Image: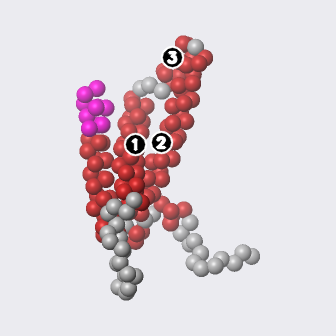
Amino acid sequence: MLKVQGHPNRLGVRGWAVGGRWGLERYLYTLHRLTGVGLILYLLLHILVTSSRAFGQAAWEAAMGRVSGPVFHAGEYLVFAAFAFHAMNGIRLVLVELGFGVGKPIEPVYPYKTSVDFQRSLAVGSLVLAGVLLVLGTLDFFVLD
């Protein structure tokens, strides 16, 4: 039997998906992963549909006929929503990695302070910007169409 050092993973996939006590940043991390996987899947589908052009006009029209309609229009909107969130959260993550929004380094003396309070404003700002993009995209997809 394999002996586990430290704390065993009792939560399994739920521990990956549910932020629990870690708060907003953990949920953003999970959503960033999920939107990244979704965007990769959309990219593969896009390449598949676009490559049908190489097989002639009839194949192209057949492929475009399969991916048109209200269900796929709503799907395109979800891809846009995933892109808006993923892009804004990615910019936030780059800023954090470069040291912006994490506060000054402090000596690790009890009571320990974390940089979560400093990062929270960046997280909220990225969500607000993603929301603005989402509103503009909603207008473009459904109102101005």
Q: Tell me if 109 is positioned left or right of 63 in this view.
A: left
In the image, is residue 138 part of the stretch drawn in magenta? yes
In the image, is residue 8 part of the stretch drawn in magenta? no
For residue 61, the mark is 3
- Categorize mark 3 by other alpha carbons within 10 Å: few (<14), some (14-19), many (20+): few
Magenta stretch, residue numbers = 136-145
For residue 83, the mark is 1
Q: Which element carries disc 2, helix, strand or loop?
A: helix
Residue 28 visible to an observer of this rendering: no
Q: Mark 3 is on which residue type?
A: Glu
For the C terminus, the image quarter is top left
Q: Mark 1 is on which residue type?
A: Phe
The span from disc 3 to disc 2 (Cα, nearest Å) is 24 Å
Q: Residue at x 35, y 70 (%)?
A: 115
Q: Which residue is mark 2?
A: 39
- Please provide percent x and percent y for residue 30: 45, 57
Q: Which element carries disc 3, helix, strand or loop?
A: helix
